[in-house]
Amino acid sequence: MKKVWVIIKREYLVRVRTRAFAIGTIISPLLLLGLVVLPGFLAERGGGGEKNITVLDQSGDPKLFEGIKSRLESTGSRSGEDPGEGFGGSTRFNLSQQVLTPEQNPQDLIKNQSGSAGKNDPDRSFLVLGPSVLDNSPPEYHAKNLSDFSIRTLGGAVSAAISERKLMRAGFDASKISQYMKPVSLKSFKIGAGGESTEGGMRQDFMIAFALLLFLYMSVLFYGIFVMRGVIEEKQSRIVEVVISSVRPTQMMLGKVIGIGLVGLTQIGIWALSAGLLSMFGAKMVMAQGGRMPSIPVNLLIYFVLFFVLGFFLYATLYAMVGSTVSSEEDAQQAQMPVTLLLVVPMMIFGLVMSNPSSNASIVLSMVPFFAPTLMMLRIAVINPPAWQVILSMLIMLVTILGFVWLSAKIYRVGILMYGKRPNLAELGRWLRYN
Amino acid sequence: MNVVELKNVTKRFDQFIAVKDLSLEVRQGSIFGLLGPNGAGKTTSIRMIVNIFAPDDGDVLVMGKQVSPELQPMVGYLPEERGLYKKMKIADQLVFFANLKGVDSGDASRRVDDWLERLELSDWKNKKPTDLSKGMQQKVQFIGSIIHNPEVMILDEPFSGLDPVSVDLLKSVILDLKNQGKTIIFSTHQMEQVEQMCDDICLINHGRQVLSGGLREVKRRYGKNTVILDYEGTDAFLAFDLIKQHKRFANYSEILLNEGADAQEVLKRALESGARVNRFELVEPSLNEIFIETVTGSKNKAQVAEAIR
C-alpha cells in the first residue's frame, strides 16, 4: 500500500501546485454563482434600464394616467421588498400622455410615430387605454420587443390603477382603497426532519438545490475527465511501462483515482468552507442592508461531500477504464460518450425529481447508482427523504463502485499497454480473461 | 547462481502464442543479450520477468524465487517504449521512480544528485523534460531505471537516439555496474553492441528459443566459414556451388561458405579467373550473419512445420 501512497502523493501534488488549480478554485464558484444569479440579475437590470412609453388615452379619466405613472415611478424602490416579484423592477419608465378622442383610431397614431417618422426614438412603445377600459375592455400594449420582463411591472401597475379607479367609481373611500389593495404575499415554511417548521422561500430552496446539483455534476464530470486524461497522458508519454514494472496496474489506477479525488476534495473543501463562512457572516451583512441571501445548511454540505466522493469514485473508475483503452485524446472523445451520458441524464430529468421529489419515479431514479449522486443530493436538498432511502442509495453505489473497480482494473492493466486501434466490446471481453 | 531463470514458459494472448516453452538462464554478474526479430516475443518475456504479465505455463524465477511484487525492487527496467512526465522536474521524477521501488525520499535525492552528476545532467536537475534534448531524456530514463540500485537491470535498446559520446558514457556505466556484480539483460537489434558487451546470448523467434549460449561458444559453433576477400577483377568466379552467400562491399567481399566447403577452393578459383587478390582471410561469422541466418532459417523451418500440420 506504500506504493499506492507514492502514486497518490504525486498525482495530488502535481495538480494542486499548478496555477490552473488556483484559478479554477476561485473562478468556478464565481462562474456558477453567475450562472444561477445572472439571468435574473440581467433581466432585472437589463432592458436598457429606461423605457419610453406613450400612453394613448381614450378613457376620459385623467386620474387613471396619473395612477399608472405614480405607481411605475415608485417601483424602483419597491423591488427590494420582494425579490420574488422583482423582475423588471428597476426599469425606469418615462410616461407621456396623449389624450385621444374616442373616435380617433390609436392604430394610425402608432403607425405614424413608429414608422419612418419615429426614427429618432425607434424603441418607443405605446399603451392604449381604450374608451371603455374601465368597463372590462383590456388595455393594449404595443411595442417592438415583447419579451421584456418589465412588461410584467407595467401590467401590474396598469391593472392596479384601473382597479383603483373602478373602486373609486363605485364609491369607495380613496384612503381605504390603497389599504385594501395592498398585495398579500404568501409566507412559506419548510417542514424539517423533526417536524419543525422553519421559514424559507421556494426560491431559496430552489436556488440552493440547483446550485448543489450543478456543482456536483460539474465536479464529478471535471475530475472524472481529469482521471481519463491523466491515464491517456501516461499512455501517450509511454511512462506506464516503467511505472507498472514497480507497482501493480490496479494500484496505479487506484492511486491516480484517489489522488485526483483528493484534489477535488481539496477544492470542494475550500468552496464549502467559504460557503459556510459566507452563510454565517456574509448573510448577516447582506441581511443588515435589507437584502436576502440563501444560507446553505451544514448537513447539506456534508451530504455534498459524501455524494461527491461516491459519485467521483464511480465515474472516475469508468473514466480510467475508458482512458486505458484509447491511445489519443481524439479517440477518447468518442469513447467517453457513454460514460458522460450517464452523468448528463440526471441533469436532463432533474426537473421531474425537483417538482415531485417523493414520487415513486423520483425514489427509483435516485437509487440508480449512476444518478444517485446528483438526484439523491437534489432530493435531500428539496425534501428530507427517509434515512433508509439515503443509506440504501449510498450502499447501492458502494457495491457498484466495488464492481467497477474490479472490472476497470482488469481492463486497465491490459489497455494501458495496448496502442493503436480502439478495442471493440468482444476484445474487451477477452481482456478480462488474460492472466 | 542464476539471477533470472525461465523454465518452460508459455504466454498466450487469445489464440496468439507470444512465448512458447521458453527456457533461459542468466548468470549473476553477466551481461545477457536477449535477441530476436521484431515480434519475436522479447518484450513479452521481459514483461514476465518484471512481473507485468504472469506466464500461462512454466516458472519465472528472479533471485531463485517465483517472481512477485516483493521482488520488483530487485529489478530495474528500461523499456523500449519509455517516457517521462512532461510537467514534472527531472529531479522530482527520479525521486518518484525511486520511491516507487521503496527507496525513501532523502536517500533518493542523494542518489539522484550523484547520478545526474555522473551522466553530466546536473544543470538540468530542476528543468522539465520539455527543456531537454531527446538524448538527455534518454539518460534521465536510464537513471530512473537503475536509481534503486537493483540486482538485475533490463535494458531494452538503451542506446537508441544517443550520440556516440553518450553511448560511450553509458557503456562505461553499464560495464561498471557489471563489475560491481550486477546482472544486465540487454535487448537490442544492434549486433555490434552485443558482440562488444554480451557474455551470453539467447536468440528467440516466434516465441521460441532458436539459439543460446556463450557468445564465444556460439560463434565457434558456426566455425570459420566466412571468407573475407579483397580482389581486383570480375566476380564471375564466385558463382559456384560451394558459396551460400556473397556480399560485395566497397573494398572487399564477404563470402559465406556452404557446410564442408573448402576455403582454399575459393582462392584457387579466384586466381584461375585472373583476379588479383590483395587479401584473403578466413574468419568467424559476425553475429549479424548468425542472426540473419538463424532467423531466416527458423522461419523456413516454421513454415515447414506449419505445412506438415
Image (spheres, coloured by chain):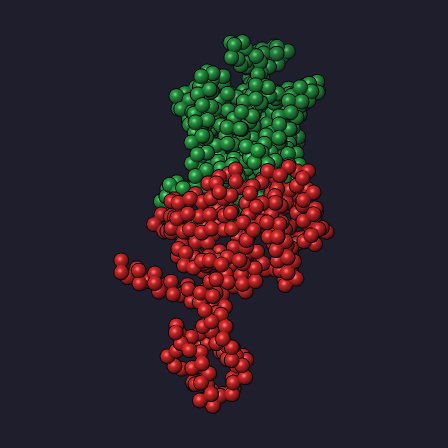
Chain colours: A green, B red
x, y percentage for residue A202? 54, 20
Given residues B105 and A373, the one toward you in this image is: B105
Is B235 placed left or right of B113 in the picture? left
Q: Nearer the viewer, residue A169 or A68?
A: A68
Left or right: A101 as drawn, with respect to A408 = right
Q: Specify the quadrant that holds the C terminus of chain B.
A: bottom left
Camera-nearest residue between B255 and A93: B255
Q: Residue at x 67, y 45 (%)?
A: B112
Depicted A174 relative to depicted A142: above or below: above
Query: Looking at the image, which residue sits at the far right?
Result: B123
Where residue A390 appears, as percent x and y from the top left, is 47, 20
| Residue occupying the far left of the picture | B308
Q: Residue at x 47, y 66 (%)?
A: B220
Q: Is residue A420 visible?
A: no
Image position, residue B306 (x, y; %): 30, 59
> What percent of the width, then of the height, locates residue A357?
45, 21
Q: Residue at x 53, y 13 (%)?
A: A192
* Marker count (numbered): 0
